[in-house]
Amino acid sequence: MITLTEIRKLNISADDARKQPLHISAASGLVRVGSTVYVVADDERHLGVFSATAPDPGLLIRLFDGVLPANKAERKRQKPDLEALTLIPAVENFPHGALVAFGSGSRPNRGYGALLSLDPFGAVCGLPKELDMSAILGPLYDAFAELNIEGAVVVGDELRMFQRGNKRHADNAIIRYPLSPVLNALLSAHADPIEPSAINRLSLGLTEGVPFCFTDAAALRNGDMVFSAVAEDTEDAYRDGPCIGAAIGIIDNDGHLLSLQRLDRPYKVEGICVRVDGDRLDLLLVTDADNPTIPAMLLSTSFAR
């Protein structure tokens, strides 16, 4: 069993009077750059910016225009469902790297993302660029009964996206693309569809008859990956259900499951990042409370591979 430690709640500064309540509740992906933690939430149109070491309230960076309804059901219907956030290394036009947020693709209005350039200190600079993900999502609707992208990670010159299954379609998979063509397609106004270079399907096991399914991933060395997974008792990619188990696992570069360790409590962890220190993995995770009145949490843990 893995024990998690609560670092802080993802509260937002009261200076942002437009944000009520003053927290992120449905955190779904994170990236750490230095002591800064960037978080996307599936029911927000903003990127959250928090300190990993201090409890100060975070700030919001707007990604998309418009305001989401306060009503929970209507908000769920209209939300962009940003489920994955990844760091793009320094490439042409982004000399200090960039952050890319991805929608889940589980509904037509959830097929968009956002790109934000970083400065030499790892801070967001300039205005975000809205991304149309249809060039990469289009071919995937034929590959999966219910598309639901929940994680993304860059490994070398490859982008790997993580498909999350559910109780009815336990269809977990790692979807691989060459990074450069995908970036070009995302930044293009009219891009042709891009087929994945490979799709690796995995079974993560069951607890109480509910499958563990991917919620996020982060890169290790030599192409290996660490991932978070939850067993959420729901039969589709739209409706939420009770989380009856959670786990952290490791997959090798070829897509083979190496390990899966349960969390001591069924936190609904939906974002993960990692720092490697020898054989020790130092992890940060964020939670989705599935309740707009409850702040998401930033959690930590360490374990040896």
Image (tube, rainbow, N blue to C red):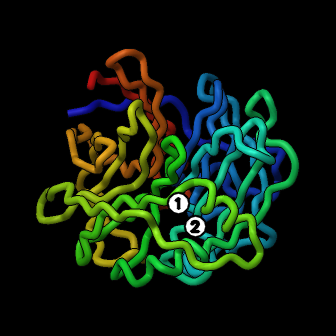
Name the amino acid type tagged 2: Gly
Position of the N terminus by quadrant = top left
**Residue for point 70% across, 36% down:** 57
Residue 117 is situated, as x and y percent measured from the top left of the image, at 78, 46
Earlier in the chain: of badge 2 and badge 1, it is 1
Residue at mark 1:
83
Position of the C terminus by quadrant = top left
Quick check: 76 above or below 102?
A: below
**Residue for point 57% across, 54% down:** 179
Judge by depth and name the residue closer to the eye, 189 or 289: 189
Q: CA distance from mark 2 to mark 1?
A: 6 Å
Quick check: 33 above or below 140?
A: above
Residue at mark 2:
103
Residue 225 is situated, as x and y percent measured from the top left of the image, at 37, 41
**Residue for point 73% across, 32% down:** 122
Q: Secondary structure at mark 2?
A: strand
Judge by depth and name the residue closer to the eye, 120 or 300: 120
Residue 244 is situated, as x and y percent measured from the top left of the image, at 24, 56
Quick check: 285 above or below 276?
A: below
Name the amino acid type tagged 1: Glu
